Image (spheres, rainbow, N blue to C red):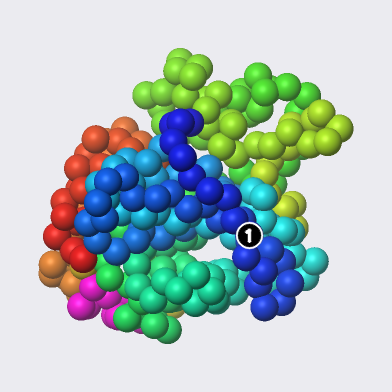
Amino acid sequence: MTDVDFTEHFFTTADGPRLNWRDYPAIGPETGLPVLCLHGLTRNVKDFEDLAPMIAATGRRVIAVSARGRGRSDHDPVAERYQPPVYAGDILALMAEIDLPRAVFVGTSMGGLMTFIIAGLHPERIAAAVINDIGPEIAVEGLDRIKANVSSREPVSSWAEAAARTRQANLAAFPKRADDEAFWEDFAHKTWVERADGMIALAYDGALVAQMEDGAPLPDLWPFWTPFAEIPVLVVRGGISDLLTPATIAEMKRQKPDLRVVEVPDVGHAPFMTEPEAWTAIKALLADCD
């Protein structure tokens, strides 16, 4: 974790659950619009502990939000509301609450889908977007792997065990980090939490699993790509991603010829975006937009 100043906040949604969000102030003079960071399916604001300070150092305020049921955000008593359209509505409500009419969006996986939905509803809210390892077509192999991972939720008794479980679940995505103990320890602290009874548990509501296993077919997401025609977009792909295929990126680029694409070698789903290739491309996008 990068040691940097940020403030913790909570926002109450229209239907009850509170969302936890972090506010990283711009370092030095502000150079452009704030950046809004949205995490993946089972992650939380800690996914951006390293990226957010890097962005803040470019002179931009950074806001990272934990979706309902993740991190310090409240679990939703109605599990059926664990759906991207609901999360997207929460983000729009938060933007209104904190008087943030427009932002640069950074969305990882599910956070990218939330960005798609917001672009369809209110494209004027998105000044530019970084879409991390997700697209309008989602490879079945990657989706099946995610379903298997979220089904393994047993708590553990130590952080060493949490790191070992994190390595087991994510080694295929980060094979070059196989022997990097510090990486897996840090990864574990981003995705697990110590409970009141001293056990270490994954930092998301287990009810998410049922929503993943309901068997409903994915909707056609290509119409959600259309609103990005006039929005600057960078797509980050893990070079060995099993969720976002080169063919999907090719079609995205065919529909949007000015699409920026960067690939992070030897990383699967999903890059942390602090990798040199990703960060260089993100800095260039930020430099070219408000």
Q: Is residue 155 visible?
A: no
x%, y% of residue 123?
Answer: 34, 80
Classify 10 Å Cα crowding around label 1: few (below 14), some (14-19), many (20 and above): some
For the C terminus, the image quarter is bottom left
Q: Quadrant of residue 32?
A: bottom left
Measuring from the top left, give residue 227's x and y in whole percent: 30, 80
Q: Residue furthest front?
A: 29
User: Residue 186: image x %, image y %?
Assistant: 52, 28
Which quadrant of the view contains residue 89? bottom right
Which residue corresponds to the image point at 28% horizontal and 70% vertical from the top-left?
A: 127
Residue 96 among magenta residues: no
Please name the predominant secondary structure of the magenta segment in the image: helix
The answer to whether 169 appears left or right of 274 in the picture is: right
* Residue hosting label 1: 10
Q: In the displayed structure, does residue 139 sit left or right of residue 77? A: left
User: In the rendered view, would you say 237 is above or below 114?
Assistant: above
Q: Which residue is at a point 18% across and 72% down the rendered structure image?
A: 256
The magenta segment: 223-231
* Whether residue 36 is visible: yes
Check disc 1 and report its element: helix, strand or loop. Answer: strand
State the residue at coordinates (41%, 27%). Answer: 175
Which residue is at 53% across, 32% downward?
Answer: 187
* Circle 1: residue type: Phe
In this picture, is 286 found above or below 4? Answer: below
* Residue 251 relative to residue 53: left or right: left
Judging depth in this view, the residue of 62 and 82 nearest the camera is: 62
